[in-house]
Image: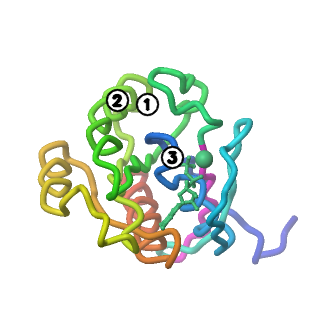
Amino acid sequence: NGDVSSRIDYVFKVVLIGDSAVGKSQILSRFARNEFSLDSKATIGVEFQTRTLVIEHKSIKAQIWDTAGQERYRAVTSAYYRGAVGAMLVYDITRRQSFDHIPRWLEELRSHADKNIVIMLVGNKTDLEKQRAVSTEDAKEFAEKEGLFFLETSALNASNVESAFFTVLTEIFNVVN
Ligand code: GDP
Ligand code: MG
């Protein structure tokens, strides 16, 4: 319709990837609905949620895809990555293994996705600082080496979740313009 308030200038597909239980679904829920659940169920079926926001006076619909419990290696299908212009590569700062698997996810992402995809490395669960098992420095160094954006977030207390998505979406906007 012609309603100015509902005009969409761009739709950007962004995918969430990373090991099971790192908080992908809760990060999405925080971003899309400002909700969080401590006993979230494992995601079933391919799902995406959208949020429309304004970046540089343009209306952008962010379509954020969440894995369908396909977190096992190579289980995420190419359809999931198709058309994605951004990716959030998520690990849990309290679980070293989830960080050690990041190179694998990155390799998978790079083999399936567009070469210009904007990637953000996300260390989630900073509210659990006492249980931290991955230092900020290690992650930052990895991100720099690989040319990724990097932020630490908490879906629980909302720290940096907006910032992570806005950084990725703004960069995508700059790439397409
Ligand atoms: P997914 O498998 O990557 O989608 O992970 P979920 O979003 O389902 O989260 C797995 C578990 O971690 C759930 O119990 C969440 O409530 C919890 N969780 C997610 N994000 C955070 C966070 O930022 N802080 C804390 N303390 N728990 C979180
Ligand atoms: Mg999930």
Proximity of marks 2 and 1: CB atoms separated by less than 8 Å: yes
Q: Where does the image place residue 135, in percent across and percent down from the top left?
A: 18, 60
Visible residue check, residue 117: yes
CB contact under 8 Å: marks 3 and 2: no
113 horizontally vs 39: left or right: left
Name the residue rendered at 41%, 59% in the picture.
168
What residue sits right under mark 2 in the picture? 110
Q: How far apart in space, not on screen, are marks 3 and 2 (Cα)? A: 14 Å
User: Circle 1 sits on which residue?
Assistant: 113
Q: Amino acid at mark 2?
A: Arg
Circle 2 residues within 10 Å: few <14, some 14–19, many ≥20: some
Q: Quick check: can you spot residue 9?
A: no
Does 94 appear in magenta?
A: no
Question: In the image, which is nearer the foreground, mark 3 or mark 2?
Answer: 3
Beta carbon at label 3 within 8 Å of ligand 1: yes
First reached walking from the N terminus: tag 3 or tag 2? 3
Magenta part of the protein: which range? 57-66
Q: Is residue 1 above or below residue 57?
A: above
**Image point 59% across, 39% down: which residue?**
67
Task: Report how many numbered discs are placed on residues in the image.
Answer: 3
Whichever of callouts 3 and 1 sits on the residue coming sooner in the sequence is 3
Q: Main secondary structure of the magenta part?
A: strand
What type is the residue that disc 3 sits on? Leu
Q: Amino acid at mark 1?
A: Ala
Residue occupied by mark 3: 16
Depth order, front residue of 100/83: 100
Q: Is residue 107 above or below residue 66?
A: above
